[in-house]
Image: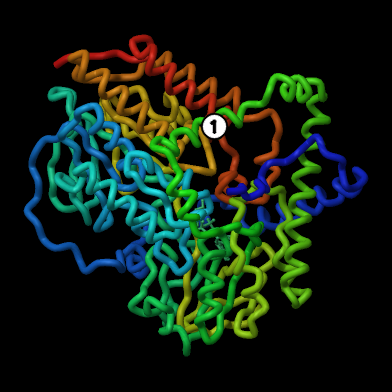
Amino acid sequence: MDKQENPLAFNIDREEREPQEYYDRIKEKFAQERAVRLDYRPEGTAQFTSEFSGALEKYAIDPNVAEATPRAPLDDTVECLFIGGGFSALLTSVRLRQVGVESIRIVERGADVGGTWYWNRYPGVACDVEAYDYLPLLDEMDYVPTRHFAQGPEIYAHCQAIARKYDLYELAVFQTTVTSTVWDEDAQMWSITTDRGDHIKARFVICANGTLSKPKLSRIRGMESFAGHSFHTSRWDYEYTQPDLSGLADKVVGIIGTGASAVQAIPRLGASARELYVFQRTPSSITLKNDWLTDPEWARKLKPGWQAARKALSLARQELSPEQQAKRASIPREEKIRKQENANIDAMMQIHERIEEIVKDPVTADALKPWYMLMCKRPCFDNDYLPAFNRPNVQLVDTRGEGITEITEAGPIFDAKVYELDLLIYATGFEVQKTGIYNQIRGEKGVELNEKYQKNGIRTLLGIHSHGYPNLFIMGGYQATFLFNLTDVLQTQGDHIAGCIDYARRNGHHSVHVTVEAEERWVQEVIDNRGKTTRSEDCTPGYYNFEGEFQRRQDGNYNGSYSRYVAHTKAVLANIEEDFVFANR
Ligand code: NDP
């Protein structure tokens, strides 16, 4: 199977297509577009809210199930407790099972495992990472995905299959939100309470609440007054739309946002709604998605362990050969940056060209062109998105960076025009990489984790361990590596966490606690790898660069390579006595 050409791999060794003035002019336009957006919303991340109370409470409700059935509160003790039941919990649990841990409890806000894939059921939901890489544990599960890019229901079913195979449903509790996680110094145990009145004690706690799990809404004047129906993409109301979207045939629909969720939903909405208005603030970069059904012949020939072999090969390929390294080293730094930027601009201009080829109305085509470096925002892949704007019932409302700032009883207003809608969909994203959403995590001396981070910046070892929080492990948070294929990161973290817990158990230690020195070493490592350019700061605002807000250099992801992150997790485990203090009760 040939691989899709990676649009994110910029070849800096190629001939440049244009003289330098051309690239400089485009960079100027990028800077102007960025400035427009920063001027409109200097408040940065504060432009959003994820605290849904009062009239906004409905945006948090799970439309997939009826209200939680009453149950008696739990008052018991488990060995390992996961806050969250998505891939983080599943992948780590499997490794814990493999080293003999029996007592595992998943506490999950949704009514099942699956995390993102439980919540996000909007039409067209699919993963943009090749399924043979994204779906984890394919060797263990003896499963081959049905297509190159798996759709949401297949991934959700895979999560359920993992939970069944590894007996993770036994102790799990659903429709339950952890509200506090407190280190009990006398008992040397974590004490967990939930919104269902549970009091659970756990020796090890794993924060597995996901990277993009708490929906957020843009704070828009008058949004509470909208009289039509409305919901967030992650809380899709199929009772209203009907599973085949036939309920929209006589409806005027609006969608706010054009990020990855909207890009997948819009073509399906366009094909079903009487009218669709797309309220755009910043266009996404759209690249073709080279999707196909898995060839059964190819699948049949796969040998046991094929996914592990594929991953090992991919990891090895990420390393430059000595010749490539020598060539790169011979190019002066400024020249390298210039070449990379120019290659990036060429990639972006190819995206512009495709828009011109596909979208018939030149004004709409122009408005759909993204003016920023590729990877400033999450790149999107969909073959049906651009053609959707050729439909007579689909209209792009380009707010030119301003966004929708007012909603009336009838619908959103832009340029003094009220768009009267039956249904308004918010595709406005999620809180990003927050540890302890819905939850307070109090470690030694009662210090809350986010208060510690606020005061001195994020401080962890590998993004997983934080001093003052013994036997607590964080997944999907900052100071860990960033990779387009998130499940690889989560598996790396899960392997490491299971390794730490296994070590403690085998050696008769009750608790494992990272030292201040190890934490400081990693903070410096993160700072050293934050990059020496201002590329992220120069990007148009979005969640990748904290909406343009100033950040301490340690308060982000570890930007050394993924392979180096993997090596660090292994090295820490191999020398575990150096970086941790172990205690017995
Ligand atoms: P995003 O945060 O990516 O997008 C939010 C969108 O809302 C942006 O287009 C933003 O514009 C827009 N917006 C916010 N406020 C307003 C406003 N007042 N008026 C108009 N527009 C507004 O959220 P998504 O849910 O789309 O995606 C989140 C992440 O989830 C993705 O980046 C990806 O990592 C993951 N995902 C992955 C998928 C996959 O694998 N295919 C599919 C879906 C999601 P602006 O850009 O100007 O801020």
Query: Where in the figure is residue 371, as x and y percent of width and height?
Result: 73, 56
Quarter-of-image position of residue 451:
top left
Q: Is residue 531 left or right of residue 224?
A: right
Does 469 appear above or below 149?
Answer: above
Give 140 or 574, whichever is nearer the viewer.
Answer: 140
- Which residue sits at x=52%, y=37%? 482
| Up-down relation of residue 129 to residue 310 (above or below) | below
The quadrant of the image that shows the C terminus is top left
> Percent x, y for residue 157?
32, 56
Tell me if residue 397 can be seen. Answer: yes
- Whether residue 575 is situated above or below residue 556 in the rendered picture: above
Find numbered disc 1 in the image and state the secondary structure of the residue it sits on. helix
The residue under the point 37% across, 18% down is 573
**Residue 554 location (% of width, % of height):** 53, 29
Q: Quadrant of ligand 1?
A: bottom right
Amino acid identity at mark 1: Leu
Residue that sits furthest to the top in the current view: 578
Front-lying residue, 152 or 216:
152
Residue at mark 1:
313
Q: Is residue 333 left or right of residue 95?
A: right
Quarter of the rendering containing residue 152: bottom left
Name the residue nearer the viewer: 152 or 235.
Answer: 152
Q: Who is closer to the viewer here, 552 or 510?
A: 510
